[in-house]
Amino acid sequence: MDGYESNKVTVEGTNEEEVAVEVPLTPIEEIITPIEVVLNPIYFEFDKSNITAKAAFELDNLVQVMNKYPDMVIEATSHTDFRGSDRYNQGLSERRAQTTRQYIISKGIDASRISASGKGESQPAVDCNPCSKEQHQLNRRSQFLIVSGNPKNM
């Protein structure tokens, strides 16, 4: 629905049945903060930079926001966990950021409205050593900083 973040639910039944289902939707404005567009986490698989189906679903919410606010410019930042060398992780995060940017552009957003930067392991969500599997996953993420055009600041 226009103006709302996408959502999905599982419905049990058969093709012959009609089932009424209520799907709660969050207004887009609630995912915009003064500094970023907050999506459900966009996580990457270990040592990968491809966009998963779950990530695509979330990135489509960013596309909706950017379509609603045509002056909004975003910087997509991608991060890695601590495994691997600093140099390798920097390169991996750059690939993740560029893949994220290309996905947004492929959905019709002008390339001038989204930049991408890899942060490697320099800005962890969880500073841990040693890290659990879950902590590593939290560090492999993307964030969407609002560079300009934030409707909350106008």
Image (cartoon, rainbow, N blue to C red):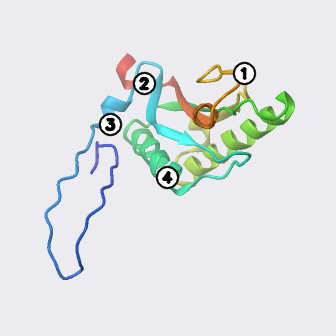
Q: CA distance from mark 2 to mark 4?
A: 26 Å
Q: Position of residue 135 (x, y in %)?
A: 60, 31
Q: Nearer the viewer, mark 2 or mark 3?
A: 3
In what quadrant of the picture does the C terminus appear? top left
Amino acid type of disc 1?
Ser
Residue at image x 40%, y 35%? 69
SS assignment at label 4: helix
Q: CA distance from mark 3 to mark 1?
A: 30 Å
**Which disc is residue 54 wearing?**
4
Classed neighbour count for the residue bearing mark 4: other residues with Cα under 10 Å, few (<14), some (14–19), many (≥20): few
Asked whether the beta carbons under mark 2 and mark 1 sit within 8 Å of each other, the answer is no
Q: CA distance from mark 4 to mark 1?
A: 25 Å
- The image shows residue 130, relative to residue 44, as above or below, that is above
**Which disc is residue 150 wearing?**
2
- Which residue bears the numbered disc 3? 28
Q: Position of residue 36 (x, y in %)?
A: 47, 25
Q: CA distance from mark 3 to mark 4?
A: 19 Å
Q: CA distance from mark 2 to mark 1?
A: 26 Å
Which of the two residues, 87 or 113, is positioned nearer the viewer here? 87
Mark 4 or mark 3, which is nearer the start of the sequence? Answer: 3
Mark 1 or mark 2, which is nearer the start of the sequence? Answer: 1
Asked whether the beta carbons under mark 2 and mark 4 sit within 8 Å of each other, the answer is no
Amino acid type of disc 3?
Ile
Classed neighbour count for the residue bearing mark 2: other residues with Cα under 10 Å, few (<14), some (14–19), many (≥20): some
Q: Is residue 71 visible?
A: no
Amino acid type of disc 2?
Asn
- Which residue bears the numbered disc 1? 122
Q: Nearer the viewer, mark 3 or mark 4?
A: 4
SS assignment at label 2: loop
Mark 4 or mark 2, which is nearer the start of the sequence? Answer: 4
Mark 1 or mark 3, which is nearer the start of the sequence? Answer: 3
